Amino acid sequence: MLTNLPASIPAGRIALWYYYRWNIESFFKTLKSAGLQLESWQQETAQAVARRLLIATQACALAWRLMRQQTAEADEARTFLVRLAGRQMKRTRPVTLTALMGGIFSLLTMLEALKHYSIEQLEAFAQTLLQPQLE
């Protein structure tokens, strides 16, 4: 392994450090994409940035946990969230972290809407939207 670290550090430990670093880099990539758009944040105080970063980190942790769960319920939840995100996935990779994040965002938005509107009201909104305009 090519590194500038002292030769006294075991290669296995260095490989572990690279593994951790890769996870951190993946986390930053997720913050920049996956609907979080870190580079577009417009918070003006450190406290506001910290709050938003905590929420984004929690969302990432939830998605990572769901990605790693090996249960039938987790499989069903992943499939549902990817579908809800509206992503087209490769057959070889049916779930990605960014698709899960998009699905989680849509699910939370949908649940919030259901707190304020009945199913009938939502269907009426959809009907209004889909109704052709005759003018």
Image (cartoon, rainbow, N blue to C red):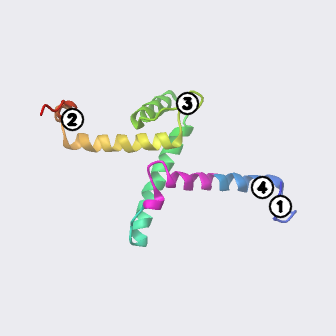
Which residue is at a point 87% across and 62% down the rendered structure image?
A: 7
What residue sits right under mark 2 in the picture? 129
Mark number for residue 90? 3
Taking depth in this image into account, of 44 and 59 the one nearest to the observer is 44
Mark number for residue 111? none
Instruction: Find numbered disc 1 in the image and state the secondary structure of the residue it sits on.
Output: loop
Q: Nearer the viewer, mark 4 or mark 3?
A: 3
Q: In x, y percent, where is residue 80?
A: 42, 31
Instruction: Find numbered disc 2 in the image and state the secondary structure of the residue it sits on.
Output: helix
Instruction: Find numbered disc 4 in the image and state the secondary structure of the residue it sits on.
Output: helix
Q: Closer to the N terminus: mark 2 or mark 1?
A: 1
Q: For marks 4 and 1, give the CA distance.
A: 7 Å
Task: Identify the amino acid type marked 1.
Answer: Ile
Write down the region rendered in magenta: 23-40
- Residue 125, quarter of the rendered image: top left
Task: Identify the amino acid type marked 4.
Answer: Arg
Q: Nearer the viewer, mark 3 or mark 1?
A: 3
Mark 3 closeness class: few <14, some 14–19, many ≥20 residues within 10 Å = few
Mark 4 closeness class: few <14, some 14–19, many ≥20 residues within 10 Å = few
Q: For marks 2 and 1, give the CA distance.
A: 64 Å
Q: For marks 3 and 2, give the CA distance.
A: 31 Å
Q: For marks 4 and 3, give the CA distance.
A: 35 Å
- Residue 18, quarter of the rendered image: bottom right
Instruction: Find numbered disc 3 in the image and state the secondary structure of the residue it sits on.
Output: loop
What residue sits right under mark 1 in the picture? 9
What residue sits right under mark 4 in the picture? 13
Task: Identify the amino acid type marked 2.
Answer: Leu
